[in-house]
Amino acid sequence: MASTPSRGWWPATGRRTRSRAERQVRPKGGLVWLHVPGQASLSAMRELARRLIEEDGAAVLMTGEAAGTRIRGVVFDEAPEEGAQMVREFLDHWRPDAVVFSEGEIRPALLHECAERKLLLIMADAGDPWFLRGHESWIPGAMRRAISALTRVYAIDQAAMRAWKRAGLAPSRVVGSGRMEESSLALPCLEAEREYLANAMVTRPVWFGARVPRSEEGAVLAAQQYAMQLAHRLLLILMPEDPARASPLARELAGQGWITASRSDEEEPETETAIYIVNDLAEMGLWYRLAPVSYLGGGLSGTGLLTSPLEPAALGSAILHGPRPGGFGPQIGRLGAARAARAVASIRDLSEALGDLLAPDRTARLAQAAWGVVSDGAEVTEAVLADLRKALAGTTARSRA
């Protein structure tokens, strides 16, 4: 079959992705397409997809990095290659009512065809604009022409907002809003269990060592020992990285003279218990709620944090972490910029930071700043949803006509 001549100003690649016959059937009703070019926006786009499905009953198509994940109610496909024919085949099949790109990735052929169809085009979690790799253009004004198709850009910060304006986007179309809310921030817990343990610990200062690798256990224990000189009734809730490590660790600590209790052995923290060892990842939300301060394991001597720092932030727990963020660099960067978390680079740093945060007013300031980072993201998500709901409402009106 002969290829259709390109209508745009970009070169066709001649490459071909999945054919229309190979794709899933398009769901009925309104459909929003979310394209995720990298990990930085994956969690936020997952949350956006969840809310569109649960709150609006919309169908959601996801492409890019999201294709390897499982999200109930979402259909997946490969994003089309940058050729006019492949882009048109993709859009003819899925017929989206609105499109959300992210991170700043620019696909000229795709943007042009979406604009031709008068689709709502949003760029969320936008850093500086950049062409899809392999499609950088030498054509003067190529970036300006490509981004002119975008209806609105939600830039992650003021620097990104300025970059979009310099690239030629009309100032009225770009907002320096920050990042969207990420998924699964407020981890669940059993309220009856939280209330019972809170009553048992009500007179004690508490902190949580979350997913602490074996290489960092010594640092956490040293911090506990140091801080107990300032608050002798301090309780450490300690979750090792490996759940199977809980029982051996309890025995080792008891042998070292620590007064411990182990949740996996159905023990509870008594008045004299110094360390309460827990191992169920499903209960992370419980411990974040009970502990005013949380140390996130993996960043001090490991390869990087083992859990998202936005999870304790969403539940009011002040955050301590090592210098290696691992896969949570953007989140740590946001918290650091807001002075909403404290980085520690050594055992001494961790001990002194913990001792400092025994003061409730200092803990509250840190936790409040972290909550501000999380809540700002929720506002951005609401703004994006408001835009999308207008497009979906138009679809509903047309279907009734």
Image: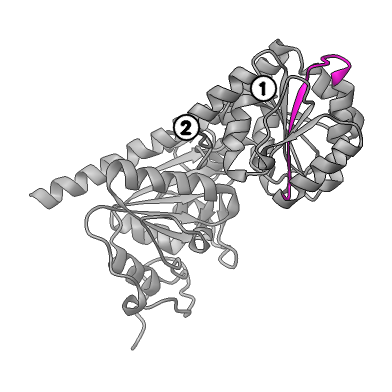
> Of helix, strand and loop, which one carries label 2?
helix
Residue 103 numbered tag: none
The span from disc 2 to disc 1 (Cα, nearest Å) is 22 Å
What residue would you read off at disc 2? 378
What span is in magenta?
A: 228-242
In this view of the protein, which residue sits in the foreground, 224 or 75? 224
State the residue at coordinates (91%, 29%).
348
Q: Quadrant of residue 113?
A: bottom left
Q: Position of residue 282 (x, y in %)?
A: 57, 43
Q: Earlier in the sequence, mark 2 or mark 1?
A: 1
Relative to 96, 243 lies left or right: right
Q: Residue at x 70, y 46 (%)?
A: 306
In the rendered image, residue 64, in percent from the top left (x then y), is placed at: 50, 61
- The residue wearing badge 1 is 292
Viewer-nearest of labels 2 and 1? 1
Residue 327 visible in rendering: yes
Q: Is residue 98 left or right of residue 322?
A: left
Q: Nearer the viewer, residue 211 or 254?
A: 254
Q: Residue at x 64, y 39 (%)?
A: 331
As shown in the figure, which amino acid type bears the numbered disc 1?
Pro
Residue at 72% of width from left, 14% of height from top? 362
Residue 297: image quadrant is: top right
For label 1, the SS is loop
User: Are circles 2 and 1 on residues that touch, CB within 8 Å?
Assistant: no
Kind of residue at badge 2 = Ala
Q: Residues within 10 Å of mark 2 (few under 14, many from 20)?
A: some
Residue 240 is one of the magenta-drawn residues: yes
Q: Is residue 50 left or right of residue 196?
A: left
Residue at the limit of the structure toward the left, as seen here: 401
Q: Nearer the viewer, residue 250 or 327?
A: 250
Of 149 and 44, the residue lying toward us: 44
Q: Is residue 180 above or below residue 349?
A: below
